[in-house]
Amino acid sequence: MSVQADIKIPAFGRTTGERDLYVFPFTSEDFHRIRSLIYRVAGISLAPSKKDLVYSRLARRLRVRQIDSFSAYIRLLESGDLQEREEFINALTTNMTSFFREAHHFPILSRHLGILPKSTPISIWTCASSSGEEPYSIAMTVVDHFKSFNTPVRILATDIDTNVLEKARRGVYPLDQLKKLSPDQLKRFFLKGEGNNDGFAKVKPELQQMITFRRFNLLDAQWAIREKFDVIFCRNVMIYFDKNTQYEILKKMQPCMQPHGLFFAGHSESFHHAADLFKVCGKTVYSPKH
Ligand SMILES: C[S@@+](CC[C@H](N)C(=O)[O-])C[C@H]1O[C@@H](n2cnc3c(N)ncnc32)[C@H](O)[C@@H]1O
């Protein structure tokens, strides 16, 4: 076996001492330009320590496009290739999520549904919905609350990343990602795969039809959202933005909420710097100041 061949494989999470192992030339200037671009198009603020991570996330794109250096790849991105720009964003987002993540939010959601006016439709927006675990957890909570699949609730699930949205629309998950669900929830909300689909489960169509999936970039200057939401889930996405970007997004989000609305944030997110827009009303739960 050739030792040389082993050395050439770019590995995930290399240490700084291994930088000479980059197969595609990737200079500090390239990294700087990539950080600026992802900040400009998606608001994502990448720490200077993420150079190796960026290399491993994007090297695949260079292979697919048969490009031999990062500087050439950056030229392609800056030439206005929108398809590649989408792939670039998809590669640099972090999509970690799970069913009933931050579980204390779901009983609060259920209680809130109980106090909303019965006659009008209720709308919920999950604005960084990733691969669907969050919107499906919301939909299950809604069905449990109304004890029916026929509810007055509409759920809008959006994300910037088109790959995770596709996964969310499919609604197929490995069984070991469904461990937090009870056997009863699994039976009511999922179809167990057989044959080639053994080890997977698919969300039932009755649950899927409660949700509309759409691509939406929170950084867009103009928001084509006319709705006033009763509930917004904006969890574990603001951590990727700096405080100014967070504030600009919150300023657009607040008018999209009903005065009685609830806003759920992620466990490490706090919006004290937006105290003019939102007030705290629970652990990582806010309501708009109108
Ligand atoms: C860590 S996941 C959080 C998923 C889910 N909300 C949760 O808490 O489990 C962050 C998501 O934010 C999305 N995201 C990042 N930047 C975004 C932007 N500018 N607009 C919309 N979504 C964005 C990513 O694609 C990713 O799916």
Image: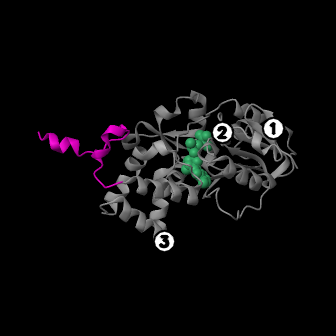
Instruction: Find residue 143 and report its horizontal and vertical position in percent.
Output: 70, 40
User: Mark 3 sits on what residue?
Assistant: 80
User: Mark 1 sits on what residue?
Assistant: 112
The Cα atoms of the two marked residues, 2 and 3, are separated by 41 Å
The Cα atoms of the two marked residues, 1 and 3, are separated by 45 Å
Magenta segment, which residues?
1-26
Q: Is residue 76 above or below residue 185?
A: below
At mark 2, the secondary structure is helix
Instruction: Find residue 262 and report its horizontal and vertical position in percent.
Output: 79, 42
At mark 3, the secondary structure is loop
Between disc 2 and disc 1, whose residue precedes? 1
Give the crowd class for mark 3: few <14, some 14-19, many >=20 residues within 10 Å. Answer: few
Instruction: State the residue at coordinates (31%, 40%).
Output: 18
- Queried whether the magenta region covers residue 8, the answer comes back as yes
Instruction: Find residue 15 and report its horizontal and vertical position in percent.
Output: 36, 37
Instruction: State the residue at coordinates (56%, 55%).
Output: 39
Q: Quadrant of the N terminus?
A: top left
Q: How is the image coloured?
A: one colour
Q: Disc 2 or disc 1, which is closer to the eye?
A: 1
Please say if the residues under marks 1 and 3 sit with CB atoms less than 8 Å apart: no
Instruction: State the residue at coordinates (71%, 33%).
Output: 105
Horizontal side of residue 115 vs 185, given as left or right: right
Instruction: State the residue at coordinates (46%, 44%).
Output: 50
Instruction: Find residue 136 and report its horizontal and vertical position in percent.
Output: 61, 43
Q: The disc labelled 1 sits on which kind of residue?
A: His
Horizontal side of residue 117 vs 156, given as left or right: right
Q: Is residue 150 above or below residue 256?
A: above
Horizontal side of residue 200 vs 122, given as left or right: left
- Queried whether the magenta region covers residue 44, the answer comes back as no
User: Mark 2 sits on what residue?
Assistant: 140
